[in-house]
Amino acid sequence: MTTDPVRPSDGELAILRVLWDRGPSTVRDVHADLAKGRDIGYTTVLKLLQIMVDKGLVTRDESARSHVYQAAQGEAPTQACLLRELMDKAFEGSAKSLVLRALTEAPTGAAELEEIQAFLDRLRKGRP
Amino acid sequence: MTTDPVRPSDGELAILRVLWDRGPSTVRDVHADLAKGRDIGYTTVLKLLQIMVDKGLVTRDESARSHVYQAAQGEAPTQACLLRELMDKAFEGSAKSLVLRALTEAPTGAAELEEIQAFLDRLRKGRP
DNA sequence: GAAAAAGTACGAACCGATTCGTTGACAAAT
DNA sequence: ATTTGTCAACGAATCGGTTCGTACTTTTTC
């Protein structure tokens, strides 16, 4: 059995994004990355990571003095979890209406539309 | 200029859903609806609605003793706003990757897939 | 007209998330 | 060996959202 994905908060998600990007990282690493975009203290990031360990969102390797953190769940399942949540809260659970809304409102280029359509075709072949 | 949609919190969104559904409603109406799904106090709903008036999420007609509340923004722009937020937070701003993720992970029936595809076709004709 | 019901307003408690200062351990540099 | 720097740990303050009790006003009912 795989542990079902935990719903990360906004701050936690920001950290997860860094970890998905960089792979296993120290607090310093994560902080450096995050601090490029906005003002944030080192200990803030540390605290968040500690909380995330408790929640099971990340794992920690304590063998070195500088602990090394790693995302415990992949990007895809996390995205799926957040999407599902939004679907339930704002789209009455309907994936279709969510997707349609996304397509109507988001400025999507022609190339991207084709990619989506191609994917849709594949999906329908696979599940007839 | 149209007022840009305000990001509602979870509780506020639940109330908006009721208002979109029922149209203009009193606190009692909203509370009755909400209370079907979960335990929630009457004054809790009242307070939330008052806050929402301040935020501009709903309008209030005070001419009757029982004030009548109405959603100030439509469902579509609100959904778009929430979608945009999630897109930025978890999909690096890419509508395409959000849509693909939704399609892969959500159990979408064949009929729905066709509807999406049809819509996609129309979209591409419209914007060549 | 008095009592009960229905309504609004508001303060306060609470909770999770976020933030950071401070402390103490350890290591590196001088 | 002393100083300087790096690190984890933790407590505390803060903030937005949610919840509800209480107080007060206006109707309705008997």
Image (tube, coloured by chain):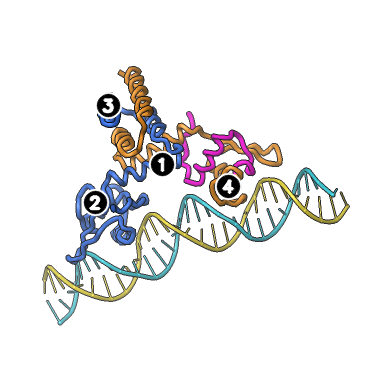
Chain colours: A blue, B orange, C yellow, D cyan
x and y percentages locating residue A92 in the rendered image = 46, 38
Residue position marked by numbered label 2 in the rendering: A19
Dot 2 falls on a residue whose secondary structure is: helix
Residue position marked by numbered label 3 in the rendering: A121
Q: Tag 2, which chain? A: A
Q: Tag 4, which chain? A: B
Q: Earlier in the sequence, mark 1 or mark 2?
A: 2
Q: Tag 3, which chain? A: A
x and y percentages locating residue C22 in the rendered image = 34, 71
Q: Amino acid at mark 3?
A: Asp
x and y percentages locating residue A86 in the rendered image = 41, 41
Of tags 1 and 2, the one toward the viewer is 1
Magenta region: which residues?
A: B1-30
Q: Amino acid at mark 2?
A: Leu
Q: Residues within 10 Å of mark 4 (few under 14, many from 20)?
A: some
Q: Amino acid at mark 4?
A: Ala
Dot 3 falls on a residue whose secondary structure is: helix
Residue position marked by numbered label 1 in the rendering: A86
Dot 1 falls on a residue whose secondary structure is: helix
